[in-house]
Image (tube, rainbow, N blue to C red):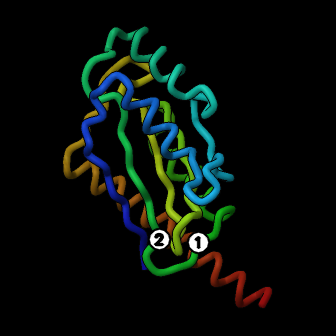
Amino acid sequence: MGCIVKVINNGYEHPWALKGLIKYILTDKDTKGQTRYYDGYYLDPENAEYEMMNVKQYFRKTQGRQARHFIVSFDDYVCMGRQADHLARQICEYYYNTFQIMYSVHEDTDNYHIHFVMNTVSWVDGHMFSEGPAELQQFKNYVNNLYNTFVKDQRRNEIIYG
């Protein structure tokens, strides 16, 4: 029982990378419209690029990697839109006290998955995001614990409420 956390290491160093990435995660591939479930922390998803760039410009850190992009997918339990939205909000809590972060639930495949985009510059003090293997594993453990708790609660509710 668990979920898969995949960090996308595409560099995202081009000046337009942030805009393209945000547009990508907010687009439902089936309808070509906006995804149903999305939100942001310390930013408005509708203005995410502008707000993230404001933080970068304020701290004079506009060069280099513009965003951290990661995906959480569920390997053995059907997690529907509203449930994935709830999990996404909890996952954002891991970083949102330091970094602007947004997410979007993609419902266009058999297993729903969540895309996250995080500013690489802290809105608090301007430090750049840095994560080694130990920190990444700690984050993955956090996400898997959230997911396992969610699955237990769902199964308990199925037993109680049929």
Residue 152 position by quadrant: bottom right
Q: Please tell me which residue lies in front, 45 or 14.
A: 14
Q: Which mark is residue 16?
A: none
Q: Between residue 92 and residue 74, name the one nearer to us.
A: 74
Quadrant location of the N terminus in the rendered image: bottom left
Q: Which residue is mark 2?
A: 74
Q: Quadrant of residue 39?
A: top right
Position of 40 compared to 158: left or right? left
- Earlier in the chain: of badge 2 and badge 1, it is 2
SS at badge 2: strand
Q: Residue furthest left?
A: 133
Which sits in the foreground, 82 or 32?
32
Nearest the viewer among 14 and 54 is 14
Left/right placement of residue 151 relative to residue 123 reads: right
- Number of other residues with Cα within 10 Å of mark 2, as a class: few under 14, some 14 to 19, many 20 or more: some
* In the image, residue 47 above or below residue 137: above
Q: Is label 2 in contact with label 1 (beta carbons under 8 Å)? A: yes
Residue 69 left/right relative to 10: right
* Up/down of 83 relative to 117, above or below: below
Q: Residue at x 33, y 16 (%)?
A: 62
Name the amino acid type tagged 1. Answer: Cys
- On the image, the x and y values in percent for residue 42 come to 57, 29
Distance from Cα at disc 2 to Cα at disc 1: 7 Å
* Residue at the (22%, 52%) spot, across then down: 134
Within 10 Å of the Cα at label 1, are there few (<14), some (14-19), or many (20+) other Cα atoms?
many
Q: Give the image location of residue 136, x and y in percent.
A: 28, 51
Q: Tell me residue 75's x, y (percent).
A: 43, 76
Q: Residue at x 33, y 57 (%)?
A: 6
Q: Quadrant of the C terminus?
A: bottom right
Residue type at numbered disc 2: Phe
Task: Give the labeled residue for mark 1.
Answer: 79
